[in-house]
Image: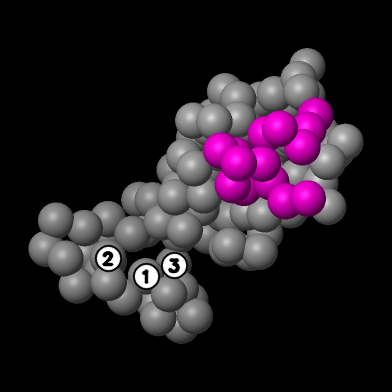
Amino acid sequence: MITTALTDEELERYARHIVLPEIGGAGQQQLKRARVLVIGAGGLGAPVLEYLAAAGVGTLGIVDDDSVSLSNLQRQVIHGTGAVGMAKTDSAKAAIARINPNVAVELHNL
């Protein structure tokens, strides 16, 4: 289980959320406790994963059965050239770790 107390690093990372009355510290803690499953790490799922990770959603699940191809890269910006041939789930997990190492990622390869 993920602890919901925000660390000093998280307080700094999410400062722009925390100052918003609609979110605040309590809202950021709710985001940290949240679990979101994203079906597909392609054209729509890729940016969704990036934004959810950056926002501090605590656990992201990724479901995909495809691998990264060169033709994906112009629209699936979570994947890079070095990920060609790699499972999209693995590529997305690596990108999420670079974006926000505080996010847990659960992979579901089909």
56 or 4, nearer to the observer: 56
Residue 69 sits inside the magenta stretch: yes
Separation of disc 3 and disc 1 at Cα? 13 Å
Q: Which circle, 2 or 3, is nearer the viewer?
A: 2
Name the residue: 47% across, 58% down: 54
- 44 up-or-down from 60: above or below: above
Q: Which circle, 3 or 1, is nearer the viewer?
A: 1
As drawn, the label of residue 5 is: 3
- Left or right of 7? Residue 19 is left
Q: Amino acid at mark 1?
A: Tyr
Say what secondary structure mark 2 lies in: helix
Question: Magenta residues: mostly which secondary structure?
Answer: loop
Residue 91 percent coordinates (x, y): 75, 44
Residue 49 sits inside the magenta stretch: no
Q: Amino acid at mark 2?
A: His
Residue where numbered disc 1 is placed: 14
Q: From which residue to which does the magenta span run?
A: 67-81
Separation of disc 2 and disc 3 at Cα? 15 Å
Residue where numbered disc 2 is placed: 17
Residue 37 falls in image quadrant:
top right
Whichever of labels 3 and 1 marks the residue nearer the N terminus, that label is: 3
